[in-house]
Image (cartoon, coloured by chain):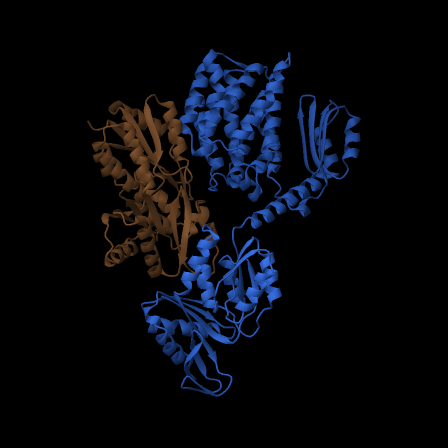
Chain colours: A brown, B blue
Amino acid sequence: MALNCGIVVDSTFDLPISFYREHDIEVVPLRVIFPDKTTYREHFELSAPEFYKKLSQVSEVPTTSQPPVGEFIEAYKKMLKRYEFVLSLHLPETLSGTMNSARTAAEEVDGEIYVKSTMSVSIGSAQILSKILELRDTETDKQIFLNKIDNLVENHLLLGVLPTLYYLEKGGRIGKAQALVGSLLDFKPLLCIKEGVVTPLGRVRGMKRAFKELYQHILDFADGKPVSLSFGYGEKPEETENFRKFLKDTGFEFKDAGIWQIGPVIGTYVGPEVVMISVLRHV
Amino acid sequence: MPLTALRADSVTSFLIRAAEYIKLSEQEINNLNVFPVPDGDTGTNMLLTLNSVAAALETLKTDSFAEIAETATKAALLGARGNSGVILSQIIKGFFLPVREKSLNEIDARTLIECLEKARITAYKAVKKPVEGTMLTIIRAAAESVQRLKRNRKLKLETVAEEAFRAATAALQKTPEMLDILKQAGVVDAGGLGLVKIIEALLDTINERPLQESQGVLKQSADVVFSSIPEEDINFTYCTELLIKSDLINTEAAIEYLNQRGDSVLVIRDMDIVKIHVHTDIPLEILNHFNSMGEIIDVKINNMKAQTEEANKNRRLQVERQEHKKDVALVAVAQGSGLIDIFKSLGVDEIVEGGQTMNPSSSEILEAIEKAPSDHVLVLPNNKNIILACEQAASMTGKKVEIMPTTTIQQGLQAVLNYNPTRTFEENVEAMKEALEEVTSVALTRAVRNSHINGIKIDKGDYIGIIEGDIVESGHNLSLVLVKTLKKAHADEASFITVFTGREITPEEQEKIAAIIENNFPEVDYEIKFGGQEHYQLLLAIER
């Protein structure tokens, strides 16, 4: 018998609302706050295209805010009516207080709730989630199911090329990439999320080299095992499409999990020109 | 008269006042916010959380303390925003636990001690890995310090609140010592300051201090920002505070008297107690003056200059130690103001000035190695004639030194770009050496005499194109020589071209060079920067 597990996520998974509906997943949205103090529940009140358009019209960078505890409480109560237990998945607590809100809410609600982090964001979290949905249907033992989720997280890598570190720095999420700030030469920083912290992999001159380096990092991480990749973009998909094509031209074999737009909250930190790649290694 | 217990009405005004105090300090708290992430929203989050409480209480028409406790707890939780809001909601929840558990209808002095203790316990439980130097430290200091008052038989409510406020303020000052990131930023903890304001609201509610008057106190406590005061900004040496029991002191006269003898004057009367705060150079004269008008209850005189100097000294030491903590330091030989700035901006710690015609001495290189803020030093000679001097310098230091075999400035930059502070020394050496093979160094200069080299006839004053030290082109037209040389260097297959212009190249010429590259190599990304080097009109790095 498949597991009777309800799933709650935050909005930084950047999946279409219809996807959540289809899989009966509750979404608790983070907020984007523009300098004029207008606040939007991302994806519900502000779509990604609307966000990037607005972003280009303001001079100051927006801020973001974790969801209130109350909304998690509501989501948990709702799910516990229909499911035996709840799995609550979120971006790392090193990047946001969302995990804290979720844990506080879980304490308040009677019922079995597991609050976990995907240790990733956006397309990365989404890729992990789709695997978890498969596991939910095939697994019968709860403990094995939870262990397998930890395993998924360990076999995942989120990579990005950020043409500018401006947004990451302004938003206070620059992490170890701080060392790359302030250069007089223009370069493309290659970053990944390691143990929840934005970590530099290198800095290269020009997009062509960035592609080669990204490819090398993907090869190193794959370590000869089969991988699936999903691709993320900010405002426009062209550069990310270029990378996908570049990768296919190298003859590298991978399962293509599609190309997706990065949502408002994560977009606030990576900026409109990001090329993001999520790698899931199948072991 | 101060309150003897918090009842339904006063506890409501406490929470509304708390929201009011946070609102007044919202921006100040936001500006302090560096932990856990410096996103400057702590004040806003705390305010939103308390506003939710205030709004719920304002619409609630009840005399039932239990109902108020219930409503406040719930509203705080539901309205909690941000980490600081979540922790605050737990503090509020804990604070009201004794009331809810025992169905009390008031909080007297002894219950207040218990409320603070429960607030501490709940707050710590809310966080998976409690970090000291934050709001948690403040609530702990307040809760723990009031414990000793339990023995006091005729314990007054205001005594407990005063002690909690004193301990919270003292703990706030210590937060930079507990959390490195605060120390580096030179601030106290943002959430901590917010919590101190809330405890201040509690104290002021109990003392029935009118809201308007207490704003003066609030303004004064804004001084708690740690050590960011430049020494020269302090006009007077002593911060002097007096608490006097007197009916004779006229507040306005006292302010006038003090303004003539110092600044930051504050005089607050509460019944027959007068609180005086002034920055002055003559604290004893002021003390004598007021001593004649009443009974002095408390005196506090701090030497602010000494405090600031001490704090600044500590900060300097801290910064120096931080720098020494670097795992690996970089030393590069470079010449030309533009190139030197570029190297520094990429993270090179020490520059030894020199190059083609001015090779630095071993002792100059040694000096830079010794100065570099790490025991592991990577040296970039950037010229083949300087490698030997670097090796000599390396043999004279006790530090672990690795000489990168960079023979050109272009290679040096390529090596620095491939330096990654999150990797180990050995990993960096390997990655940087590997990267050297990916760059072709091209230079453009002018011939100083007539000659014949590699079958190329060169006239004095001609431009000559050089690839990896070999002359490959010459001619009197810069653009022509440049394009031919670049083609021989396979620039059309490059992923990136970086151009450093020499000291004599004008901005107009620079634009011309950009146009040449764009027209001849339209597929290639490039960047032109002022290098400021001597002798070479252009230095170009062709990356594969």
Hey, which residue is sitting farthest front in the picture?
B395
Figure check: B486 above or below B91: below
How far across and how far down the image is residue A174, in percent?
44, 47
How far across and how far down the image is residue A47, in percent?
30, 43
- Whether residue A7 is visible here, answered yes or no, is no
Side of B478 relative to A141 (left or right) = right
Figure check: A44 above or below B51: below
- Whether residue B245 is visible here, answered yes or no, is yes
Residue for point 46% across, 13% down: B101
Q: Nearer the viewer, residue B242 or B360?
A: B360
Q: Nearer the viewer, residue A166 or A214?
A: A214
How far across and how far down the image is residue A136, in percent?
24, 32
Quick one: quadrant of the N terminus of chain B?
top right
Side of A82 relative to B222 (left or right) = left
- The quarter of the picture where residue A9 lies is top left
Residue for point 46% across, 41% down: B37
Q: Nearer the viewer, residue B36 or B274?
A: B36
Quick one: quadrant of the C terminus of chain B?
bottom left
